[in-house]
C-alpha cells in the first residue's frame, strides 16, 4: 500500500506536463457532473440511514425498501 499515494498524484503530474484547455461548456459540464455525483452519494447515505433508523418501516421513492442480507468472511470468520 505504500505506492497508493503516488498513484493519486500521477494524474496531476500528467496534466502539468500535458495541459488541456477546456471550453467553458465542458468545464461547466464537469462541474455539474461532479456536483450531481456528490448529491447522489449523500442522498444514498441519507436513504440508508433512514432505513436503519426505522428498521425498514419506511418508504424510499414511494416504495417499501427490501433488506438484502449478505454474509461475508474476514480472516476465516463468517459474519452477517
Image (tube, grey):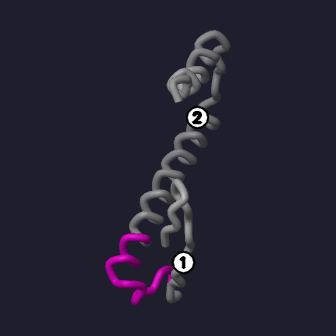
Q: Position of residue 20 (x, y in %)?
A: 66, 20
Residue in view at x 57 percent, y 47 percent:
33
Name the secondary structure under disc 2. helix
Residue in view at x 42 percent, y 63 percent:
45
Say which label, 1 or 2, has the lower sequence index: 2
Which residue carries the number 1 mark?
69
Name the secondary structure under disc 1. loop
Please provide the residue range marked out in magenta: 48-61
Quadrant in the picture for residue 21 = top right
As drawn, which residue projects farthest toward the top? 17
Residue in view at x 64 percent, y 16 percent:
14
Residue in view at x 43 percent, y 71 percent:
48
Towards the viewer: 9 or 32: 9
User: Distance from label 1 to label 2 (Cα)?
Assistant: 41 Å
Quadrant in the picture for residue 8 = top right
On whether residue 49 falls in the magenta region, the answer is yes
Q: Position of residue 28 (x, y in %)?
A: 56, 39
Amino acid at each position: 500500500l505504500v505506492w497508493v499515494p503516488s498513484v493519486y498524484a500521477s494524474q496531476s503530474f500528467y496534466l502539468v506536463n500535458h495541459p488541456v484547455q477546456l471550453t467553458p461548456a465542458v468545464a461547466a459540464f464537469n462541474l455539474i457532473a461532479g456536483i450531481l455525483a456528490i448529491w447522489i452519494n449523500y442522498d444514498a447515505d441519507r436513504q440508508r440511514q433512514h432505513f436503519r433508523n426505522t428498521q425498514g418501516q419506511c418508504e424510499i421513492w414511494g416504495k417499501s425498501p427490501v433488506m438484502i442480507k449478505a454474509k461475508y468472511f474476514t480472516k476465516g470468520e463468517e459474519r452477517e
